[in-house]
Image (cartoon, grey):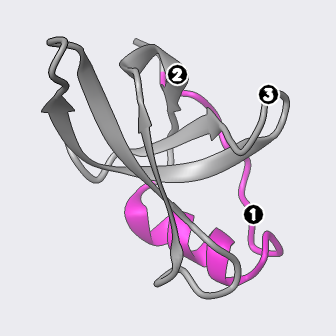
């Protein structure tokens, strides 16, 4: 499912970022990867694209608009982020 708001360790272990799942694809070795767009603060139109395994992301309770408010505000409008129970 695309447009999922997720948390992932990026750019290094122990540092977490908000990301938006924008797609899925299969690599040459038949591994499924998620394309996760990680917007930058305060301008979410620039950012990074991370290609990760499903088990490297955690779903959140945020919708797209809430995630963008957090990014644009530099975290000032951060709500409590909880992981979705599966």
Q: Nearer the viewer's eye, disc 1 or disc 2?
A: 2
- Residue 70, magenta (yes or no): yes
Kindly identify the residue that appears in the image at 75 percent across and 73 percent down. Answer: 77
In the rendered structure, which disc, 3 or 1, sits on the residue that comes first in sequence? 3
In the rendered structure, which disc, 3 or 2, sits on the residue that comes first in sequence? 3
Q: Position of residue 44 (x, y in %)?
A: 53, 80
| CA separation in Å, label 3 and label 2 | 11 Å
Disc 3 marks which residue? 13
Q: Nearer the viewer's eye, disc 3 or disc 1?
A: 3
Kindly identify the residue that appears in the image at 79 percent across and 28 percent down. Answer: 13
Q: Residues within 10 Å of mark 3 (few under 14, many from 20)?
A: few
Disc 1 marks which residue? 78
Kindly identify the residue that appears in the image at 68 percent across and 42 percent down. Answer: 10
| CA separation in Å, label 1 and label 2 | 22 Å
Helix, strand or loop for disc 2: helix
Disc 2 marks which residue? 56
Q: Which residues are magenta?
A: 63-84
Q: Residues within 10 Å of mark 2 (few under 14, many from 20)?
A: few
Q: Is residue 82 left or right of residue 30?
A: right
**Residue nearest the viewer, comparing 31 with 60:** 31
Helix, strand or loop for disc 3: loop
The quadrant of the rendering that contains the C terminus is top left
């Amino acid at each position: 499912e695309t447009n999922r708001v997720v948390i992932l360790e990026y750019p290094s272990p122990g540092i977490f970022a908000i990301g938006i799942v924008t797609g899925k694809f299969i690599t040459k070795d038949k591994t499924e990867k998620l394309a996760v767009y990680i917007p930058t603060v305060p301008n979410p139109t620039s950012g990074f694209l991370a290609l990760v395994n499903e088990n490297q992301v955690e779903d959140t309770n945020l919708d797209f608009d809430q995630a963008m408010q957090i990014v644009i505000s530099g975290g000032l409008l951060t709500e409590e982020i909880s992981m979705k129970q599966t």
